[in-house]
Amino acid sequence: MSFEEYAALARQLSAQHRAGEQHAAAESARRRDLHAAVDYLQQRLTAQGQRLDQLGRAIGIDQPPPAPTPPPAPTAAGSGDGEVAGAAGAPGRADVGAYPQLPAGEARLALPTAVSPAGGGVPAQRSAAADPAVELELARRMADEADRHGQQAELLAQRPALLPTWSPLARAVAVYAGCGAAAGVLVLILVLASGVGLVDGFTLGAWICAGLPAVAFFGGYLVLGRWGRPAMVAGTPPRYLPLGFLICFLLVPMAYCAYLLMVRGLR
C-alpha cells in the first residue's frame, strides 16, 4: 500500500468517525428533546386529571365508574394429557409452546401478529415500530383537544341551571317577580274566600300586607340559592335581598289594588 492510499484511507476513516460522532450527538439531542416533551406532556395530563376530578366533584361525581373486566382469553384445547394441541405445541415435548411466553408487562405491550392466509397459520411479519415523535405529536394534539373541551365544560359549569344566559340581576328580578305573582294569585283566592265569609277582614289584611309578601320573598331567596347558583363558583352569588324585598312587598299589595280597581270598573 502506497503512502497516498494510506492517507486516503486515513481520511476516509476520519470522515466516518466524525460522521458517527455527529450522528451520535444528533441522536442524543433528539432523545433529550423527546424526554423533555414526554415530561411536559405528563405534567399536562396530570393537571388535566386534577381538573377533571374538580369538575366531577362539582357536579356530584366522586370517582369514575370501574372499568369492565375483560373476558378471559380462550385456551387451546389439549389432547387430554396436558400437551398443547395444534401449532402452539412443540413436537415431542409436553407443556412447551412453539412461541416463548412473555412476562405480563411485555405481553400488554406486544402487538398482535397477523395471520397470513396463504401461510396456513404462520404469523406474518410485524409492522415497523411507530416513530416516537409522531406519537408525541398525536398525544399533544389530543391533549389540546382535551383542554378545549375542558374549558367549554368549565364555562358551562359556571352557569346556573335557572336562566343560564341571563345576568344575575335580571335573574333575581325575574325570580322575585315570579314569586310575587304567585303570591298575587293567592291574594285573589283569599279575597274570594273573604267574600264568602271564610276569611275575616283582619286576617285578609295581615296576609296581604305581611304574610304573602314574606312568603314570596323567602321563596325567591330559596329558589335563587338552589337553582340560581352555578356548579363551580367561588363564594355565594348575589341574591339582591333589598331588591327582592321591595319587589315582593310592593307586588302583592299592588295585585290586591288591581283586583279592587277591576271589580269597581266592572260595576
Image (tube, rainbow, N blue to C red):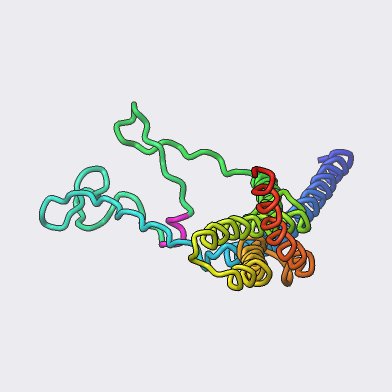
Q: x and y percent of residue 60 in the render?
A: 54, 65
Of 63 and 166, which appears nearest the observer? 166
In terms of image quadrants, where is residue 114? top left
Residue 81's spot in the image, x, y percent?
11, 57
Q: Residue 65, percent across and down? A: 45, 61
Say if the magenta span includes residue 105.
yes
Towards the viewer: 114 or 96: 114
Identify which residue is drawn at 60% across, 68% down.
Answer: 204
Decide if residue 193 is on the left or right side of residue 93.
right
Q: Identify which residue is drawn at 21% across, 55% down.
A: 93
Q: How many marks?
A: 0
x, y percentage for residue 78? 16, 51
User: Which quarter of the image is occupied by the N terminus?
Assistant: top right
Rendered position, 123 above or below 132: above
Residue furthest left in the image? 80
Name the magenta segment's main secondary structure.
helix
* Residue 25 is covered by the magenta coloring: no
At x 72%, y 71%, the residue is 236
Can residue 133 be seen at all in this image of the molecule?
no
- Residue closer to the observer: 119 or 20: 119
Say left or right for 198 vs 4.
Answer: left
Work out which quarter of the rendered image holds the C terminus and state it. Answer: top right
Instruction: Name the residue at the top extreme.
Output: 118
- Depth check: 231 or 84 in front? 231
- Magenta highlight range: 104-108
Vertical comparison of 199 with 251: above or below? below
Tell me what residue is drawn at x 54 percent, y 57 percent. 192
